Amino acid sequence: MQIRIDNSAGFCWGVVRTIDITEKTLAAADENETVYVLGDIIHNPKEIERLAKKGLKTIDHLGIEQLAKTDEKATVLIRAHGEPPSTFQMAEDLGVKLVDATCPLVTGLQNRVKRYYDKGYQVVIYGKPNHAEVIGLRGMVNDNCVIILSEEEALEQVDFTKPTVLFSQTTMEKYVYHKIRDVIESKVRNFVEGGETKDHFQFKNSLCKEVWGRDEEVVQFAKDNDIIIFVAGRNSSNGKSLFKHMKQYNENMHYIEDVEEIDWNWFEGSEIVGITGATSTPQWYLEKVKAAIEEWSKSKETVQI
Ligand code: SF4
């Protein structure tokens, strides 16, 4: 049996950077200092567990208020998804020290959304309303924006008479995003301003290349293997959409979060095994899954002899 890991798998650079900042902050803390992160550091329970063993504690927004009263030396990390301005303001008001590990691409997107809002545009975002990144974007415009997940929702919720700008959460699906763009573009009216006709629709390609740039590679990987073991956190947005995309090219795909979930019957009749995952899946865990499959494969051969 041939077992291989997808070359394009492993953390994206934004997550690598966030984890690096986290490790350095943990290493710099003395024994009386505790490092917290606001929300899960990434959507992967294995990496959360690894960092928790090094002392990282996860808190929610209410937890920041508690810290202000109980732990003067606390440091709170902001994860790659970013936070709305209200979180930074709250920490400042309470005197809680923050370390901002937001992915620079997300920070750039937040600033662009704010710029268009300030210019008077209706801001439309293709994304999940309660995803941390979208909550951060909503905060940039005081929640004065339209959040949609489909063309149907665009038709129902967008005011096509207004100058409109369309953005996307960084990890959404390219195909759906472009369909939403086409629908809005065809509906937003051109209107005359100062004697000049202007196109009042702006489309911003805010999908992350670290996600969509893998499209072709993962499709080829899906086609080249008899079976695919897809490793990602159950709450990984990128994981769910990548899995759905790949499954169109290989029906024999299985989504796992933990190596213990593997059912060895899945491998019946398969010779080439591919292992891949989301941008939040650590390389070390992909290696662990590979080692487990190799061990099982060897034990099977021994039994056959
Ligand atoms: S997927 Fe892209 S935007 Fe999201 S953390 Fe990674 S590099 Fe940043």
Image (cartoon, rainbow, N blue to C red):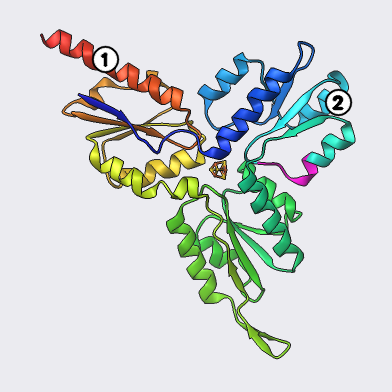
**Does the residue tagged 1 have its C-beta within 8 Å of any atom of ligand 1?**
no
- Magenta region includes residue 85: yes
In the depicted structure, whether residue 197 falls above or below residue 221: below
As rendered, which of 25 and 85 lies closer to the eye?
25
- Left or right relative to 143: residue 237: left
Q: Quadrant of the N terminus?
A: top left
x%, y% of residue 287?
39, 22
Residue drawn at the location 16% of the way across and 13% of the way down: 301
Q: CA distance from mark 2 to mark 1?
A: 50 Å
x%, y% of residue 97?
81, 29
Note whether residue 103 is visible.
yes
In terms of image quarters, where does ligand 1 lie? top right
Name which of mark 2 and mark 1 comes first in the sequence: 2
Q: Are marks 2 and 1 in contact (CB under 8 Å)?
A: no
Residue drawn at the location 61% of the way across and 67% of the way down: 158
As rendered, which of 279 and 14 lies closer to the eye?
14
The residue sitting at the left extreme is 305
Q: Which of the 4 image quadrants contains residue 196?
A: bottom right
Amino acid type at image mark 1? Trp
Q: Secondary structure at mark 1?
A: helix
**Residue, disc 1:** 296
As rendered, which of 198 and 262 lies closer to the eye?
198
In the depicted structure, whether residue 36 falls above or below residue 219: above
Amino acid type at image mark 2? Ala
Q: Secondary structure at mark 2?
A: helix
Q: Quadrant of the C terminus?
A: top left
- Left or right relative to 292: residue 128: right
The residue sitting at the bottom extreme is 195
**Residue, disc 2:** 68
Residue drawn at the location 18% of the way across and 25% of the way down: 268
Q: Which residues are magenta?
A: 82-87
